[in-house]
Image (cartoon, rainbow, N blue to C red):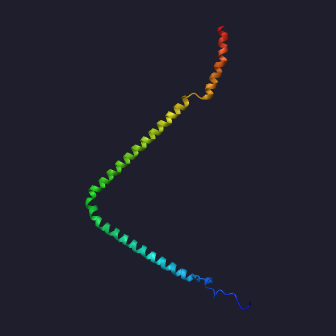
Amino acid sequence: MSDQQKPTDQQDPTSQRLPEPTQTSKQVVRLITATTIGAALLGLSALILTGTVLALILATPVLVIFSPILVPAAALLFLFTVGFLFSGGCCVAAIAALTWIYKYVARNNAPRSDQLQLDHGRMKIASPATDNAEG
C-alpha cells in the first residue's frame, strides 16, 4: 500500500482552481470602465451644451422682435393666474370659516346628555312638590 500514493492537488484536474484575479487587474478594469463611461458622459454633455447655445442664438432675434407682444402677454397671463389662485384661496377660507361657525353653533345649541339628565332630575323633584301644592 505504500506503493500507491494519494494523488496530489497538482495531479488531480478536478481540484485545480483558476488563479484568483490580482488586485491590480481589478483596478485596471475599474479604470477602463470609469474612463469609458466618463468620456461618454462628457461628450454627451458637450453636445447638449452646444445645442443649447445654438438654440439660444437662433431664438434671440425672434424674442427681441416679438418682445413687445410677449412681455405684456406674459404679464397678463401671470396676473390672471394670480387672480384665480387668490380667488380660489379666499373661497376655501370662506368655506372653512363657515364650516367652523356652523359646527360651533350646532355644538353649543345642542342639548348635552348631562344637561338632559339634570333637567330630568329637576322635573322629578319638582313634580311631587307641585302635586302637593295643588292638592
Seen from the viewer's position, the closer of residues 10 and 72 is 10
Q: Tell me what residue is drawn at x 47 percent, y 78 percent.
A: 35
Q: Tell me what residue is drawn at x 33 percent, y 52 percent.
A: 75
Where residue 3 sits, quadrant-wise, is bottom right
Work out which quarter of the rendered image holds the C terminus and state it.
top right
Q: Residue furthest bottom?
A: 3
Where residue 113 sits, quadrant-wise, is top right
Q: Residue furthest top?
A: 135
Residue 80, percent from left and from top: 34, 48
Say whether residue 75 is left or right of residue 107.
left
Residue 6, percent from left and from top: 69, 87
Seen from the viewer's position, the closer of residues 67 and 115 is 115
Query: What is the number of callouts on the image?
Result: 0
Residue 53, percent from left and from top: 34, 69
Seen from the viewer's position, the closer of residues 76 and 54 is 54
Say whether residue 94 is left or right of residue 11.
left
Residue 22, percent from left and from top: 58, 83
Q: Tell me what residue is drawn at x 52 percent, y 31 percent.
A: 106
Where residue 41 sits, quadrant-wise, is bottom left
- Say if 2 sits above or below 104 in the image: below
- Say if 44 sits above or below 129 in the image: below
Q: Residue furthest front?
A: 1
- Say if 77 sits above or below 31 in the image: above
Work out which quarter of the rendered image holds the N terminus and state it.
bottom right
Q: Tell me what residue is drawn at x 61 percent, y 26 percent.
A: 115
